[in-house]
Image: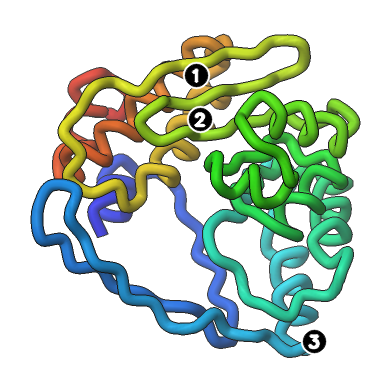
Amino acid sequence: MEWHQAAEKDRVPIQEIPIASAARTGWAFVEGAGKRLDFFTEDPRWKSADWRRCKKKLLRLIRPRDWLVVAGSVPAGVRRGWWKSLFLSLKKRGVQILVDGKGPLLREGLQAGVEWAKANLEEAEGTMNRRGAERCLAAMQTRSRGRCRLLITRGSRGLVIKAGGITVSVPAPRIRVWDATGSGDVVTAALIHGIRQGWEIGKIAGFSAWAGSEQAARRDEVVRRLKKRGVLA
């Protein structure tokens, strides 16, 4: 994987935490610019023992001041309150958490007051039962009691961040979309990079929107362009 090779070359520490259980897998056939077919296996349904093993392993391996990013599809079968309990336990240890998803994962991340809660607009609307980014952000802020910083991506319309009393909306650069796979993950990586660099929120928002668009436009050139901008050594 390109990101893994680039991270190893730049000596970015990576900790892989294998969970001995079934996971969803997928494949994509990219026929041309903006043309793709996706193939996914069914979401696995974990048993109670799988969830207990997952929590135990995460609590044992994740260290204070680490960033935990929970993103993408998660197994079915989680009991109500499991995510909230995990996040609260990790927060007590000084772990910083970013949740990127929908449904129980997003709702319980908000309830636990994770540092960042992120979703695309469709996920946010479905989870919060609201229409439009502004209404979703307001509902997310209410559920989190103002403790979370929030980010909603809007595809070709860019993204919007709400952090405390500041709301920043950034349009997406005009690009020729080749394949948007992984763009949301690149936005997340750019967001965390900006946070760790101590950038102000407007710069973080702009950089995140740019990086996600680069991923959608030319997947094989993202790392090279980041290096050219001086973001990676």
In the picture, residue 165 is in which quadrant? top right
The residue that mark 3 highlights is 48
Determine whether the residue tagged by mark 2 lies in a helix, strand or loop: helix
Residue under the image location 76 percent in, 60 percent down: 104
Judge whether 117 appears above or below 164 on screen. Answer: below
Quarter of the figure with the N terminus: bottom left
Q: Residue sitting at 67 percent across and 77 percent down?
A: 76
The kind of residue on which mark 2 rests is Leu
Residue 104 horizontal side relative to residue 10, left or right: right
Residue depicted at x 81% and y 53% = 108
**Within 10 angstroms of label 2, few (less than 14), some, or many (20 or more) residues?**
many
Q: Is residue 142 above or below residue 125?
A: above
Residue position marked by numbered label 1 in the rendering: 204
Kindly check if marks 1 and 3 are in contact, taking CB atoms under 8 A apart as contact: no
Nearest to the observer: residue 195 or residue 133:
133
Are the residues at dot 2 and dot 1 in contact (C-beta closer than 8 Å)? yes
Q: Residue placed at 87% from the left, 45% from the top?
A: 111
Return the x and y of residue 50 as percentages of the image width and height.
71, 85
Element on which disc 3 rests = helix
Q: Position of residue 172 (x, y in %)?
A: 35, 23
Q: Residue beneath label 2, please?
A: 191
CA distance for labels 2 and 1: 6 Å
Three-letter amino acid code of the residue under disc 3: Ser
Q: How many marks?
A: 3
Residue 134 lies, in percent from the top left, at: 66, 24
What amino acid type should be assigned to the residue bearing mark 1? Answer: Ile
N-terminal of the two: label 3 or label 2?
3
Left or right side of 163 for 28: left
Residue 27 vs 11, above or below: the answer is: below
Going from the N terminus, do you reach mark 2 or mark 1 first?
A: 2
